[in-house]
Amino acid sequence: MTSSRRLKDVDWIGLILWVFRAVIIILVIVGTVRKLFFGVGIQYSARDWFDFAVSGLSQGGLYALIALGYTMVYGVLFMINFAHGEFFMSGAMTSTMLVASTLSRSGFMNEQPIIYLVIVTFVSVLTAMGVSLLTERIAYRPLRRAPRLVPLITAIGASFFWQYFFRGLFGGDIKPFPVPAILDGRIDLFGIDLLKVRVVVFAVSIIALVLLYLFVMKTKTGKAIRAVAEDKDVATLMGIDVDRTIATTFAVGAAMAGIAAILWVLVFKQANFFMGFVPGIKAFTAAVLGGIGSIPGAALGGLFLGLIEAVGPPLFLEGLGIPGAHQLKDVTAFTLLVLVLIFRPQGIIGERLAEKKA
């Protein structure tokens, strides 16, 4: 009887998850050791590993910018805006088709590359903000007091709507994005040879992240956003226009996505109507990883995800003898999402907002 009772008292689910966690950790350690100390797979130089890291941090900066939209909207509305990836796409597609192509054909792009980049970024940001405000006003605002599943389904529907709206507007084929010659090649930075475009992407991402953090923490509007995130009813009593503040939150998050869109097409040199889906899901992964609802968490999660994507496959996946490891970076990202949701759903530095706001 005593043994039977002890078996019933065992938390079998917790035990299975503990074993699963241990297996994952062991596999990562084994793969890393085999790669670094036993030379399994392709041999990389220190320069190659450094390039992987720089590329990962640059890509992570893009994920962080997009993730900010997820985390800010979640903070004020407690919903996952799965249409956010389409705000990113709308900026890239509109700036590519209406501005970049025209300025490239006219020769203005290489004559005034800085002004060209400012113009396409401005158009991208305005478009993303406009699409986000329309979505918030038409699709989300009427559902504020609806059950949580309803806005989630609506967000998925809005995502499909914007995808096929821009497909109908600009076509379904891949659109080349003209990149100024000033961003071609490599640059020597403190004695380190780096791709120019990656340096620009990382630098702009960090500057945008810092500016957004200062905006949210130091400005009157930022304080209103934090007040609404804390308690909408109390914020209303304090004289804060909740609807306007929520719309501002959408617009600011979309502005970050618009900046990320231009940085993205500078790296990959193309845009299409479906380009928001995978970056959007990865940015959501970054937001969850860092702690959804936390702006520093989204930034940290994005940088960490980009680094894992770049370094993980050639490090521990190749070390485990998995073929085609470089093609599995998406698998690495989504596996990381599953693991975080299982073992640390609040993320690295996030709060348990579900408990706080329930």
Image (cartoon, grey):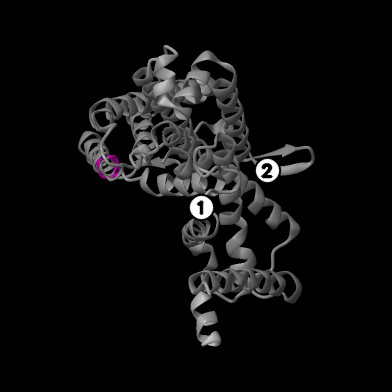
Q: Nearer the viewer, residue 226 or 13?
A: 13
Instruction: Indicate yes or no whether the magenta region holds residue 154.
Output: yes
* Residue labelled with disc 1: 345
Q: CA distance from mark 2 to mark 1?
A: 36 Å
* Residue labelled with disc 2: 194
In the displayed structure image, the side of residue 343 where residue 103 appears, left or right? left
The x, y position of residue 111, in whole percent, is 51, 21
Element marked by disc 1: loop
Could you tell me which quadrant the C terminus lies in? top left
- Residue at the front extreme of this rendering: 1
- Residue at the right extreme of this rendering: 191
Can the viewer see residue 77? yes
Identify the residue at horizontal 55%, vertical 49% (top origin). 347
Q: Quadrant of residue 195?
A: top right
Q: Amino acid at mark 2?
A: Leu
The x, y position of residue 201, in whole percent, is 57, 36
Residue bounds of the magenta highlight: 151-155
Task: Count all numbered tags in the image, as a single digit.
Answer: 2
The x, y position of residue 357, in whole percent, is 44, 38
Above or below, comparing residue 293 to residue 223 in the picture = below
Q: Amino acid at mark 1?
A: Pro
In the displayed structure image, the side of residue 330 where residue 312 appears, left or right? right
Instruction: Indicate yes or no whether the magenta region holds residue 255.
Output: no
Q: Residues within 10 Å of mark 1 (few under 14, many from 20)?
A: some
Q: Earlier in the sequence, mark 2 or mark 1?
A: 2
